[in-house]
Image (cartoon, rainbow, N blue to C red):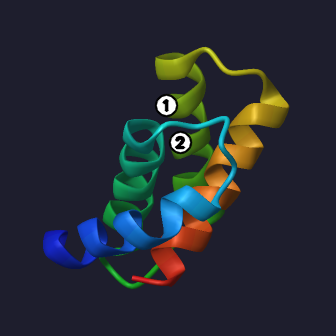
């Protein structure tokens, strides 16, 4: 699975929003994939991920939403 994630990042990250570096997108994507692992992804999990992004990166609300949506898009291609 990690190999597949790495392949996606090699192909897709360069196409995505350039304001985020690969480590930020990888970290956010990994949080999303972990939350989805049990087959369910609800608002509580999403809110927790958004809070962790905010705490870790000190992004504003708009930037938090953009990185989340970008990472979510990447995970859907995994």
Image mark count: 2
Q: Who is closer to the viewer here, 65 or 21?
A: 21
Q: Do the residues labelled 2 and 1 touch (CB within 8 Å)?
A: yes
- Picture coordinates of residue 58, whole percent (x, y): 61, 14
Q: Residue 72 carries which label?
A: none
Q: Is disc 2 placed on a helix, strand or loop?
A: helix
Q: Quadrant of residue 27?
A: top left
Instruction: Give the structural element (helix, strand or loop) at label 1.
Output: helix
Please name whichever residue, 28 or 35, is drawn nearer the observer in this view of the structure: 28
- Frontmost of labels 2 and 1 is 1
Spot occupied by residue 44 in the image (x, y as percentages of width and height): 58, 54
Per the image, the residue denoted by label 1 is 52
Q: Residue at x 75, y 33 (%)?
A: 63
Q: In which quarter of the image is residue 54?
A: top right
Residue 48, numbered label: 2
> Which residue: 24% across, 79% down?
4
Q: Who's the residue at 43% across and 72% down the image? A: 11
Quadrant where the N terminus lies?
bottom left
- Residue 24 vertical position relative to residue 42 in the rendered view, above or below: above
Badge 2 local density, few (<14 within 10 Å), some, or many (20+)? few
Q: Where is residue 78? Give x, y as percent.
A: 39, 82
């Amino acid at each position: 699975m990690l190999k597949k994630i790495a392949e996606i990042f090699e192909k897709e990250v360069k196409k995505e929003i350039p304001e985020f570096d690969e480590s930020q997108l990888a970290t956010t994507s990994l949080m999303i994939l972990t939350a989805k692992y049990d087959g369910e992804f609800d608002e509580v999990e999403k809110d927790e991920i958004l809070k962790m992004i905010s705490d870790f990166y000190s992004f504003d609300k708009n930037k938090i939403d953009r990185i989340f949506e970008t990472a979510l898009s990447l995970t859907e291609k995994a």
